[in-house]
Image: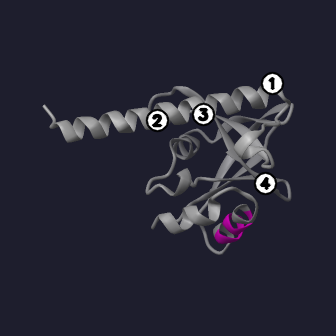
Amino acid sequence: MSNPNEQAMDKSHEEFHANVSDFNQRVIDEFRANDGKVGGYFANDTLLLLTSRGAKSGKISVIPLQYFKDNEHIVIIASAAGADNNPAWYHNLLANPVTTVEVGKETFRVRATQVTQEPERSRLYARMAEQGHGFADYERKTSRKIPAVLLDRID
């Protein structure tokens, strides 16, 4: 049996993920109800909804992410808000790179390609940091090199 401090940390971790999940669901609902537009914290950001299949579980999940266009590519950043580990969706895309995104009113299939090589990764990250909430801080919060991901339309 774990001690009370460990139990409290486990509960806090579960509550955190439940709160993030609730927040994401509200953003997803608003995005879909308003043709890809949302208010609040993300009001002036370009968002997409990324659908991914769990690398281990096979479970389908949808997450809102900030993005930008780089020529024909859609670019997303695996920041996890500066956490020390890459987000689950990143691992999911490595295992299952063909997936679906929603951008505005449109839904289409894409192929994901990770960008970890320098200087391209840094160039893409800097572009996101210029326009996206918190991205400049995220890189300072972690020792990992936060990967960029290119999403290329395939249909």
Q: Which residue is mark 2?
A: 17
Query: Can residue 62 be seen at all in this image of the molecule?
Result: no
Task: State if disc 3 and disc 2 touch (CB < 8 Å).
Answer: no
Identity, as a three-letter code, of the amino acid under mark 4? Phe
Q: Which mark is residue 23?
A: 3
Instruction: Compare marks 1 and 2 and give the one earlier in the sequence.
Output: 2
Near-viewer residue (21 or 90) = 21
Q: CA distance from mark 2 to mark 3?
A: 10 Å
- The magenta-colored residue range is 122-127
From the image, which quarter does the C terminus lie in?
A: top right
Residue at screen point 70% across, 68% down: 126
Queried whether the magenta region covers residue 124, the answer comes back as yes
Q: Earlier in the sequence, mark 4 or mark 1?
A: 1
Numbered marks: total: 4
Q: Quadrant of the N terminus?
A: top left
Residue 68 percent coordinates (x, y): 78, 54
Residue in view at x 16 percent, y 35 percent: 2
Please rate how many residues cluster around mark 2, counting C-alpha atoms within 10 Å: few if below 14, some from 14 to 19, many from 20.
few
Which amino acid type is shown beneath numbered disc 2?
Answer: His
Q: Which residue lies at the image location 71% right of the left edge and 70% below the top edge? A: 123
Identify the element where label 1 is drawn.
helix
Looking at the image, is 120 positioned above or below residue 50?
below
